[in-house]
Image (tube, rainbow, N blue to C red):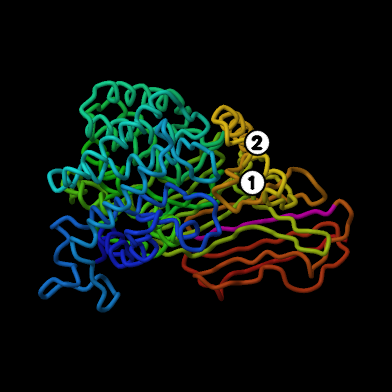
């Protein structure tokens, strides 16, 4: 039995040395305390990303006495997970890293209270709220262990950030508005000033007003499963800090939407969302559990089963995300005493899915469940299909890609308006192979951004223009490597997914308007029990229409996958 909450905590503790290693720890340096090593060490960035300072909050939290048994200098100290001989640094070293990180954060802060994250002069909403949350949580748990100098600096820094946030909104991404409510609530807790509590309530009311009829919240104009979890985290953090239970009903509806779309191994499909975010909440689910049996079942499931690296890779695997989010597993453990874990009276998570098909037309995602058998279909992401038996991924099908000297095309790409049809025992989808056009800003666009953002007013309007582009193209642009693919084109695709208690089939029909399909260019691999299988074999050059039927029994394996390919001249 593996406790996922402890697994994620141990992952952070085992990598705390990395966070210490990327911080400028030279007290004589003008960038002392900075975690953005591309700025302070490598000099490849002209500004410091303030969000990397959140690592300092995580290290400060790890200085708490409850983590003493993992310290390298502790008598009989415990090893961390499977990393032999690795232990936490001493309390003094970790607190000093926190102190220096806080000092550098205050130096990065603009006079009006905001920070940069993605580019110089951005004055970013996300950078301001998330750094405030991280250090506000550090204050929440460190309490009297904060020395007077750090408490005074923390209060002053958070107050300035709170004043900036209280006057603004970020309605492009709903999770940002929810996080602003949590940040302002923590500023209220640190300063005791009621104006921040009132501003937090306004931000939360604004967030809740945008919940859709299917219970999800819009992110850059679309749905994203991972950001549903992020929003759940920070909304429930707001609830916990303020005691305002008003948002609980909305969060229960949100979890009910998420529930059928969460895989049995506690992961989600990155492709089933605009921002390709596969994060699954632990903190928000745990804080919701006192009011919701489903949340109690899921957090109870995570106390017994862990997806391992698949659970941490969405937000902790690289230096950037480890710096930003490493405090989350730590505070999840620290909040654990208020969680309600499912007992024998509640159904097990894996066996509590709604039976049969659950479809959400606006989000353009659907899932089928029957006991140990689970199938997920995401037309919004290009028709991605995954099938599970228990918590084991049996089948994964990411559709088609076509790579030729003329360019690259693919069936993947976010579009919730693909045509979906209901079939006996399943659903079908019509789409096309869109040309992959990845977004990389060039010299002139970067120059305009750099010069324009020297003036706060111009910075505001430039960001508004960026957000307009993101919403129009349905892409996060600066937070994913997703292709910006257009509709239509030469190749059309129809996918039909049919399932029953014995097995399932995926029937694809791809057509070339110019009757020039090339077998050497078209790729359609599938994964069966973690092994790659080619679903297209033989030569079909020059054909107009290709039909591919993939069939697999629930009791099957890679060897039993049956593929039938039909070529129409």
Residue reaching furthest to the front: 28
Dividing the picture into quadrants, the one containing residue 23 is: bottom left
Q: Residue at x 30, y 49 (%)?
A: 298
Magenta highlight range: 502-512
Q: Element type at marker 2? A: helix
Queried whether the magenta region covers residue 505, the answer comes back as yes
Q: Position of residue 96 (x, y in %)?
A: 24, 57
Q: CA distance from mark 2 to mark 1?
A: 30 Å
Q: Residue at x 22, y 46 (%)?
A: 346
- Write down the residue under mark 2: 469
Q: Quadrant of the N terminus?
A: bottom left
Q: Position of residue 365 (x, y in %)?
A: 53, 43
Asked whether residue 361 is in view, the answer is: no
| Mark nearer the viewer, 2 or 1 | 2
- Write down the residue under mark 1: 428
Dividing the picture into quadrants, the one containing residue 406 is: bottom right
Q: Main secondary structure of the magenta part?
A: strand
Choose between 2 and 485: the one closer to the eye.
Answer: 485
| Horizontal side, residue 286 vs residue 18: left or right | left
Tell which circle, 2 or 1, labels the residue nearer the N-terminal end. Answer: 1
Q: Quadrant of the C terminus?
A: bottom right
| Horizontal side, residue 190 vs residue 212: left or right | left
Q: Residue at x 64, y 52 (%)?
A: 412
């Amino acid at each position: 039995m593996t406790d996922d909450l402890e697994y994620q905590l141990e992952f952070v503790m085992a990598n705390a040395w990395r966070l210490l290693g990327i911080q400028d720890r030279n007290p004589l340096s003008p960038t002392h305390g900075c975690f953005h090593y591309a700025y302070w060490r490598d000099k490849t960035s002209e500004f410091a990303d303030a969000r990397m300072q959140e690592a300092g909050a995580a290290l400060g939290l790890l200085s708490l006495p409850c983590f003493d048994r993992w310290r390298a200098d502790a008598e009989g100290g415990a090893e961390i997970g499977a990393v032999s001989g690795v232990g936490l640094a001493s309390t003094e070293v970790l607190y000093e890293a926190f102190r220096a990180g806080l000092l550098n954060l205050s130096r990065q802060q603009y006079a009006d209270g905001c920070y940069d994250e993605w580019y110089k002069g951005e004055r970013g909403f996300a950078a301001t709220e998330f750094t405030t949350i991280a250090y506000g949580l550090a204050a929440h748990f460190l309490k009297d262990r904060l020395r007077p100098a750090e408490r005074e600096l923390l209060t002053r820094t958070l107050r300035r950030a709170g004043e900036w946030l209280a006057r603004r909104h970020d309605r492009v991404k709903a999770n940002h508005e929810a996080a602003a409510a949590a940040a302002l609530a923590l500023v209220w807790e640190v300063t005791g000033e009621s104006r921040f509590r009132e501003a937090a309530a306004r931000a939360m009311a604004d967030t809740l007003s945008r919940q859709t009829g299917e219970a999800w919240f819009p992110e850059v104009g679309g749905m994203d499963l991972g950001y549903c979890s992020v929003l759940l985290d920070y909304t429930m953090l707001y609830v916990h800090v303020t005691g305002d239970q008003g948002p609980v009903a909305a969060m229960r509806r949100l979890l009910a939407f998420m529930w059928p779309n969460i895989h049995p191994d506690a992961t989600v499909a990155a492709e089933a969302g605009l921002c390709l975010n596969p994060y699954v909440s632990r903190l928000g689910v745990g804080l919701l559990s006192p009011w919701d049996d489903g949340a109690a079942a899921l957090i109870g499931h995570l106390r017994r089963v862990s997806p391992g690296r698949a659970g941490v890779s969405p937000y902790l695997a690289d230096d950037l995300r480890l710096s930003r989010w490493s405090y989350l597993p730590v505070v999840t453990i620290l909040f654990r005493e208020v969680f309600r874990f499912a007992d024998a009276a509640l159904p097990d998570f894996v066996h509590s899915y709604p039976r049969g098909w659950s479809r959400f037309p606006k989000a353009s995602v659907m899932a089928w469940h029957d006991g140990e058998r689970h199938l997920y279909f995401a037309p919004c992401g290009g028709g991605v299909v995954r099938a599970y038996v228990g918590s084991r991924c049996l089948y994964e099908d990411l559709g088609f890609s076509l790579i030729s000297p003329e360019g690259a095309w693919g069936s993947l790409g976010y579009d919730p308006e693909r045509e979906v049809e209901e079939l006996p025992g399943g659903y079908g989808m019509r789409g096309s192979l869109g040309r992959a056009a990845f977004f990389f800003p060039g010299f002139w666009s970067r120059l305009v951004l750099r010069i324009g953002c020297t003036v706060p007013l111009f910075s505001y309007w430039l960001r508004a223009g960026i957000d307009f582009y993101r919403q129009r193209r349905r892409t996060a642009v600066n937070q994913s490597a997703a292709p910006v693919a257009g509709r239509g084109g030469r190749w059309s695709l129809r996918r039909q997914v049919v399932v029953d208690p014995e097995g399932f089939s995926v029937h694809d029909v791809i057509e070339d308007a110019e009757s020039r399909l090339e077998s050497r260019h078209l790729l359609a691999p599938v994964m069966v029990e973690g092994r790659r299988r080619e679903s297209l074999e033989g030569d079909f050059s020059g054909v107009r229409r290709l039909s591919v039927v993939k069939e697999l029994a629930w009791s099957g394996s890679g060897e039993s996958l049956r593929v039938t390919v039909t070529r129409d001249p």
